[in-house]
Image (cartoon, grey):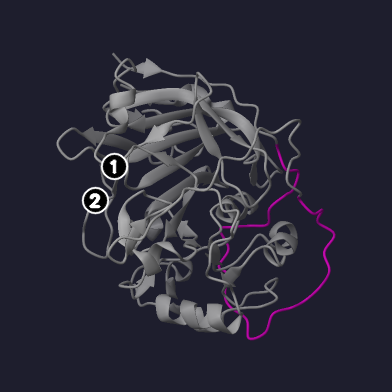
Amino acid sequence: MTVRVKLLAVGLLFAMTFAGCGKKEEPVPEPVKEEIAAPSVEAIPSPEPEETPSVLERVEVDGQMESYLTGEWKPTEVVSRRPIAVMIPNNSAAMPQYGISKASIIYEAPVEGRITRLMPVFEDFDDLERIGPVRSSRDYFVYVAMGYEALYCNWGLARPYVEELINRDTVQNISAGVEGIYNPAHEAFDRVSRPGYATEFTGYLFIDGMEKAAERLEYDWAYDDAYVPPFTFAPEGTRAEESYQNKESAGVCYPGGQVGNQGGYGAYNPYFEYNEEDHLYYRYQNGKEQKDELDGSQLAVSNVVFQYCHGEVRDSHDYLAFGVHGEGDALVFTGGKVIKGTWERYDGDATPAKFYDEDGKEIIFNRGKTWVCCIWQEYGEFVEYK
């Protein structure tokens, strides 16, 4: 029997408005610098925040350390550097995407048009030639990337409402040279021939150019000393579900339910299906497996998170806003179990959302990749799992 879950969140809203996303965003030779009247968005103050969790103590063993993002053992040089976060379209006209199966975290949220956009977060990108196609920035994605201390990569932006934010010193961005970007990274982006695809779905981030741009812009690849990892992972050799044996089982979860709705996930009805043999959640969309063009593999993760955020339509163009600071409800799917709880993010832009169970304890995640779905709270009634 399908269980419908309706959760109320109290996430706080940032009052800004977007410019169009559906228009083509062509690069220009030089950036146009100008002052804008859009208000600066500041971190939401905490009434009385609890002590920030301590940074995970990591020990190097045979040239490897545990990843902050997945808990897995990887080369020290890979997990010691900040990741990159790349804006990726998720609508049918752009599919398939290239390289996203290599991401450690995939963040998904609704955008105008009532579809979703992805922001994969990569730490393993050395063997990738390119990632894409790459699309434009929205403010709530920037704030999430800041919480991971990621270098933020985009091609285009909702200029009147993202320009001030993305050009701050606190946002290290690798951005294509469009109007509103003050320090463009021309060397990081190029077009790829895709016969039959619209131009806006042919722009890609090239890793060698991205690294050259980061060097030229003098970006620091090292994590900050006060870095807070986003997840708490099960101890090595154990499974997270061992701590949640009394929790409800769920083999399939639908961020937008199984019928069309206007909450962002209703257009393509994505879902995740748990495989008990390899303990992975496999992604489906449009009634079929969602695959990576790189190698034809189906996207799969160890954990799925439904993070409920208050959202609103900003204007007649259907541009959206979501509160990704503050707190709200959450569902965490791991090891075939569903853990009901909450998320909190009160300690500023440089810290991520943390997830807690109904007893106020940090939820334990299984080691591996995680997919975070931003659920529009006002459409939370459509969420299903069974």
Mark found first going from the N terminus, 1 or 2:
1
- 290 in magenta: no
Q: Nearer the viewer, residue 365 or 321?
A: 365
Q: Which residue is mark 1?
A: 236
Relative placement, left or right, of 89 versus 129 is right
Examine the rendering and report whether any part of residue 343 can be seen: yes
Identity of the residue drawn at 41% across and 18% down: 4
User: What type is the residue that disc 2 sits on?
Assistant: Gln
Q: Nearer the viewer, residue 296 or 240?
A: 240
Relative placement, left or right, of 162 versus 282 is right
Identity of the residue drawn at 72% across and 64% down: 163
Q: Which residue is mark 2?
A: 298
Q: Quadrant of the N terminus?
A: top left
User: What type is the residue that disc 1 sits on?
Assistant: Glu
Identity of the residue drawn at 35% across and 72% down: 126
Relative placement, left or right, of 275 versus 385 is left
Relative placement, left or right, of 17 versus 142 is right
Q: Position of residue 32 (x, y in %)?
A: 74, 78
In the rendered structure, which segment of residues is drawn in magenta?
13-41
Is residue 348 placed above or below 78 in the rendered structure?
A: above
Is residue 140 placed above or below 176 in the rendered structure?
A: above
SS category of the residue bearing label 2: loop
